[in-house]
Amino acid sequence: MSDTMPSAEDGLSLNRALWDLRARVHGTTPADRFYDVESFLAGRQTLYSLERELAGDVAGKDLLHLQCHFGMDTLNWARLGARVTGVDFSPAAVERARLLAARAGLAATFVEADTQRLPAHLEGGFDLVVATYGVLCWIADVKAWMRGAAMALRPGGSLLLVDIHPAFQSVAALDPLVVDWPYGGGEPQRETVTGTYADRDLTTPAQETVQYPYSLGEIVTAAADAGLTTKHLGEHVAAEFDPRGILHQGEDGRYRLPFGDSHLPILYSLLARAPGPGAGHPGWTTGVES
Ligand SMILES: C[S@@+](CC[C@H](N)C(=O)[O-])C[C@H]1O[C@@H](n2cnc3c(N)ncnc32)[C@H](O)[C@@H]1O
């Protein structure tokens, strides 16, 4: 790989190596409360209210979960009654997801694929395509990702994307405030990773990665270019958990990103619909929520 701009293929193989490694360790160390497999097997619901409310009733729906990791969230959508398919590019993640489905006694299909090049057999098969928390920063070609999501939807089906807000993504530390990532632009950002958000005490072998910053405008425009109509765009200044371990927790238990006397958004949520029939979800709105 050159010292300057990594190619998309180089980025993909470096990132796959990281996620193979993480798929093998996540949920296997005692301090990993983030991926507590035993409580999941005992019935714990791992989905947050944000994505559950935006998805509405998924019972009986065909749901495609993109970048499903080792499948806990995918299987929780199954517990809510959806017929689920999970996609991830990490063979280790897909293997573990299949084993977890068997242990949980839940029906699910897991496919090993790059979400920028979804296999043709997924075309038009889904009422809902879902991706959550740590998705687009791994994607070199956000337009291809959106085209894949749109391709997988039935007429009138919806994409639900809940991810880390680009404003939060650009912040490295809060006290004092350090901003070390561009707000969008899609330029590859190299980083050598030696740990994981799931267990902050764990050191993992150093792995070079390549991540990609996208602004909210670039994300919504990519969805529009893929033929999807935005029905809801939410920017959330409080979250039920801290995806990056740097936020302040309030007395209400929720996490926020202080910015002077105010707060910056932590998460965004996008619901976008494919053309064609479909009544949609009655709760769809647009705006900042605290
Ligand atoms: C932060 S995790 C997603 C978290 C997930 N919501 C969870 O908590 O289990 C990111 C996932 O994206 C996957 N991934 C990254 N780039 C990908 C790509 N190009 N195609 C498919 N999967 C990819 C990784 O293997 C990893 O499982």
Image (cartoon, rainbow, N blue to C red):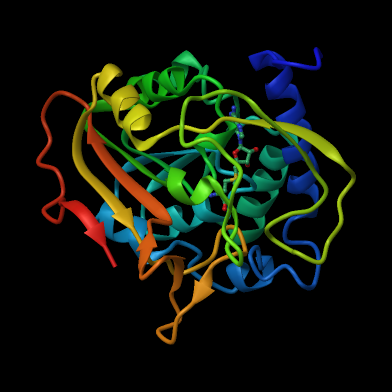
Q: Residue furthest right?
A: 205
User: Is 47 located above or below residue 30 in the figure?
Assistant: above
Q: Quadrant of the N terminus?
A: top right
Q: Quadrant of residue 283?
A: bottom left
Horizontal and vertical percent for residue 66? Answer: 49, 36
Specify the farthest residue to the bottom. Answer: 251
Report the quarter where the C terminus lies: bottom left
18 up-or-down from 76: above or below:
above
Q: Residue at x 79, y 33 (%)?
A: 17
**Left or right of 83 on screen, residue 24:** right
Q: Position of residue 285 (x, y in %)?
A: 15, 52
Q: Which quadrant of the figure shows ligand 1? A: top right
- Count the marks: how many? 0
Relative vertical location of residue 289 with respect to residue 139 in this rendering, above or below: below
Residue 86 vs residue 194: left or right? left
Vertical placement of residue 168 versus 140, above or below:
below
User: As rendered, which of 174 and 163 lies closer to the eye?
Assistant: 174
Q: Position of residue 120 (x, y in %)?
A: 46, 14
- Residue at the location (30% across, 42% down)? 270
Residue 45 is at least partly visible in this image: yes
Residue 87, visible in the rendered structure: no
From the top left corner, tell me how far across and down residue 212 is, in percent: 57, 30
Instruction: Please tell me which residue is depicted at 13% across the width and 24% down the height of the picture.
Output: 276
